[in-house]
Image (cartoon, rainbow, N blue to C red):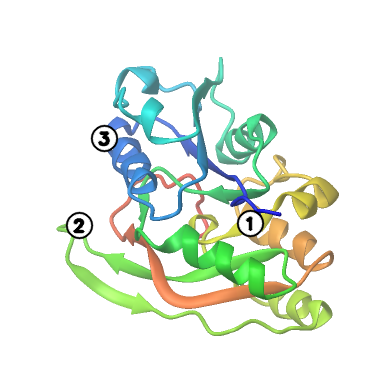
Amino acid sequence: MGERAEPLVSVVVPTYDRPDRVERAVASVADQTYDRIEVVVVDDCSETPVADALSRDHADAFERFEVARHDRNRGGSAARNTGIRASEGEYVALLDDDDRWVPQKLARQVELFDRRDVGVVTTGAKVLDENGQLLRRYRHDDLPDDPVALTKRLLCRNVVGSCSAVVVDRGVVDAVGGFDERFPSWQDLEWYVRLSRRCRFGAVPDPLFVYRRDADERVSDDL
């Protein structure tokens, strides 16, 4: 019997009218030390199609690379849901187009799935200013092992973090469904509450994703 193959991680990148930033985001996925990755970029009806701005090299960097495009602007939640439905991996990771990842992020998160009985893994974060200078590092404290306790904490505030921090087991996503497209904001928090009622969460404390404080019109308005 050979060793178990690495699970495929699906990375969903919703984007709207930010070609330079989505290219940097996808490049940070290509730089991951983890090997088995597919990427689904969802263009939420940008004025100039995002596919025209993305490097053709990405098709060779991943096991699968797809760009889906909405025929009208439907918002971040709908874009994430489109990407989730189009993806095929055992794990689903989300990356907003104005964020990027540290190279070890996915490897560290998949390793935690292997060690613990969890359905969601989040990480700490780095925050940059408009000039790309480091403002702050956030290490992520471990989350309550009891799902009920976690749900209660989430009803008070988002203790999990940005969508760009999390990786979710496919079985849990299938059980709870995707983002509720009726919510104009706080869609990630509502999703976390539903997820917390189905599984335990784990955290890699180190800051493994990066976002800029000056990001204009972020896909998620609750950060």
Tag 3 secondary structure: helix
* Labels 1 and 2: the sequence-earlier one: 1
Q: Amino acid at mark 1?
A: Glu
Q: Amino acid at mark 2?
A: Glu
- Give the residue drawn at x 65%, y 61%: 189
- Give the residue drawn at x 65%, y 74%: 115
Residue 37 coordinates in the image, percent (x, y): 50, 43
- How much space separates mark 3 and mark 1, taking CA atoms? 39 Å
Q: Is residue 57 left or right of residue 70?
A: left
Q: Which mark is residue 3?
A: 1
Nearest the camera: 132 or 121? 121
Tag 2 secondary structure: loop
Q: Amino acid at mark 3?
A: Asp
Q: Is residue 160 left or right of residue 194?
A: left
Q: Within the image, what quadrant is residue 84 found in?
A: top right
- How much space separates mark 1 and mark 2, taking CA atoms? 45 Å
